[in-house]
């Protein structure tokens, strides 16, 4: 009862002086919705919010985690239907919600802390999302592997796609499972697909991307038959059984317990950090599946468009002056040097802030040097593949599910290509 009484006193905003002019104002509580599933990101969010709350006199940020395995698009639609938007959102399907008027402009006091190339304006000239991590493109979509196993079996990191296929075959010939991947959640299916499709998507980089070319009639889903076949063959021949019910975070456990020699990832250094936490003695490394000619094709980060992600302020929060001010205060804190150093210490790559040269980079995590070496690799080639279709995210979810059904033997390649093309045509027709 005494504790409750003290709590009520602390939240009442009662005067600190007899005249009442110096009354203490209650803190504004705002919610921060974020996607879980990656342990490093979860720990970063927790650490940053805790540090912010300890130093803020005006705001308390309340964590609102989205459970692992949840479909993000469905969760956002449900949230919108119930009118229960948080103030700060770890955003997906950005363009859809910008067009629907569900997001508020990010103020200049936030964007001036971030390098200009790390964010972009919408058609109305406003900025609606700001990055939550370093914009190093999809270098995070890679293969994490057991370096000690490679050394013990005289295996090398592949320099060409044929080398990668030979690597898979050599591991299988040893009687071991070459590759663990996940599909219990739909989105991790990208982790193997995107590197395989990258050389094909990259061909359209100068034409606004593959999906723009397909929208204009200059490309079709049929053009993706070869990487779809590669995806199917690798799944059938080399992927550890049970992938259909494996959650993304479980691949770490499979790797450190020697149930597979390699695992797909989209978390970059975050996945390496997860592995290090589970088994500090595990000697992890990473590489990206190369193209046939040895090129390492990596998709650039989209700072705009429906595929872009980042932190946003909801329009609902902007209707409340105190909530909008608190959301702004939190984002201003998010892009400070001290916050960046806190993120790095947790194993995260801090966002591209203006004062990035003051950040203390964390290279202590086993395998992290492989990640940074990829950024300097002479074979690295960036490409763009952004769709301006406002409902592309819904199509992308359909495409992911269709690929999983194909990999699982529920649908042939021909049927998969046909139904994905039909769905894309509907998406284009819908505008």
Image (cartoon, rainbow, N blue to C red):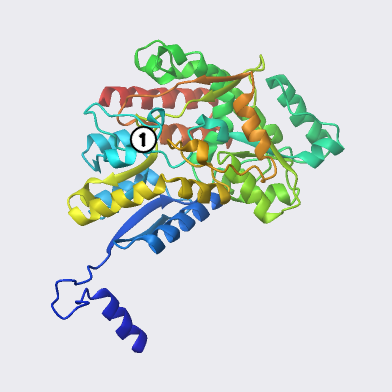
Query: Residue drawn 26% across and 36% down?
Result: 98
Where on the picture, by quarter, is residue 239?
top right
From the viewer's perspective, is 56 left or right of 369? left
Query: Callout 1: 10 Å neighbours few (<14), some, many (20+)?
Result: some
Query: Residue drawn 62% across and 48% down?
Result: 273
Image label count: 1
Query: Residue drawn 27% across and 29% down?
Result: 122
Above-or-below relation of 412 to 93: above
Residue 331 point in image, percent of width and height: 35, 47
Query: Residue drawn 51% across and 40% down?
Result: 358
Note whether residue 20 is visible: yes
Foreground pick, 294 / 183? 294
Residue 346 point in image, percent of width and height: 56, 51
Foreground pick, 295 / 58? 58
Above-or-below relation of 60 to 257: below
The quadrant of the picture occupied by the N terminus is bottom left
From the viewer's perspective, is 11 left or right of 203? left
Residue 69 point in image, percent of width and height: 48, 50
**Secondary structure of the residue carrying numbered label 1:** helix
Note whether residue 410 is visible: no
Residue corresponding to mark 1: 394
Where on the picture, by quarter, is residue 219?
top left
Foreground pick, 325 / 401? 325
Residue 240 point in image, percent of width and height: 69, 42
């Amino acid at each position: 009862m005494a504790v409750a009484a003290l709590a009520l006193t602390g939240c009442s905003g009662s005067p600190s002086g007899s005249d009442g002019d110096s009354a203490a104002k209650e803190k504004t509580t705002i919610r921060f919705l974020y996607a879980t599933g990656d342990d490093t990101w979860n720990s970063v969010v927790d650490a940053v919010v805790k540090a912010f709350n300890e130093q803020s006199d005006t705001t308390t940020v309340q964590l609102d985690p989205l459970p692992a395995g949840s479909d993000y698009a469905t969760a956002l639609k449900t949230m919108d239907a119930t009118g229960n938007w948080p103030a700060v959102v770890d955003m997906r399907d950005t363009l859809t919600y910008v067009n629907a008027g569900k997001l508020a402009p990010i103020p200049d006091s936030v964007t001036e802390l971030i390098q200009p190339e790390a964010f972009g304006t919408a058609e109305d000239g406003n900025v609606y999302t700001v990055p939550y991590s370093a914009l190093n493109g999809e270098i995070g979509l890679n293969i994490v592997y057991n370096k000690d196993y490679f050394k013990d079996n005289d295996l090398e990191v592949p320099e060409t796609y044929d080398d990668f296929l030979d690597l898979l075959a050599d591991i299988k010939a040893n009687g071991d499972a070459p590759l663990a991947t996940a599909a219990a959640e739909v989105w991790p299916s990208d982790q193997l697909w995107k590197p395989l499709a990258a050389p094909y998507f990259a061909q359209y980089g100068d034409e606004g991307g593959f999906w723009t070319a397909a929208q204009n009639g200059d490309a079709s889903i049929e053009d993706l038959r070869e990487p779809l076949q590669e995806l199917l063959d690798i799944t059938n021949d080399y992927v550890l059984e049970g992938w259909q019910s494996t959650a993304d975070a479980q691949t770490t456990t499979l790797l450190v317990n020697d149930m597979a020699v390699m695992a797909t990832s989209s978390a970059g250094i975050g996945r390496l950090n997860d592995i290090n936490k589970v088994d500090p003695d595990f000697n992890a490394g990473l590489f990206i599946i190369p193209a046939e000619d040895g090129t390492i094709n990596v998709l650039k980060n989209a700072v705009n468009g429906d595929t872009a992600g980042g932190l946003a302020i909801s329009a609902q929060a902007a209707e409340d002056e105190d909530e909008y001010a608190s959301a702004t205060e939190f984002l201003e804190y998010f892009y400070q040097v001290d916050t960046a150093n806190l993120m790095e210490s947790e194993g995260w790559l801090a966002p591209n802030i203006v004062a990035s040269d003051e950040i203390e980079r964390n290279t202590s995590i086993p395998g992290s040097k492989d990640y940074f070496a990829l950024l300097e690799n002479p074979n690295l080639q960036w490409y763009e593949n952004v769709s301006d279709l406002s409902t592309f995210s819904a199509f992308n979810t359909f495409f992911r599910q269709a690929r999983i059904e194909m990999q699982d033997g529920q649908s042939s390649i021909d049927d998969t290509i046909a139904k994905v093309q039909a769905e894309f045509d509907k998406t284009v027709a819908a505008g």
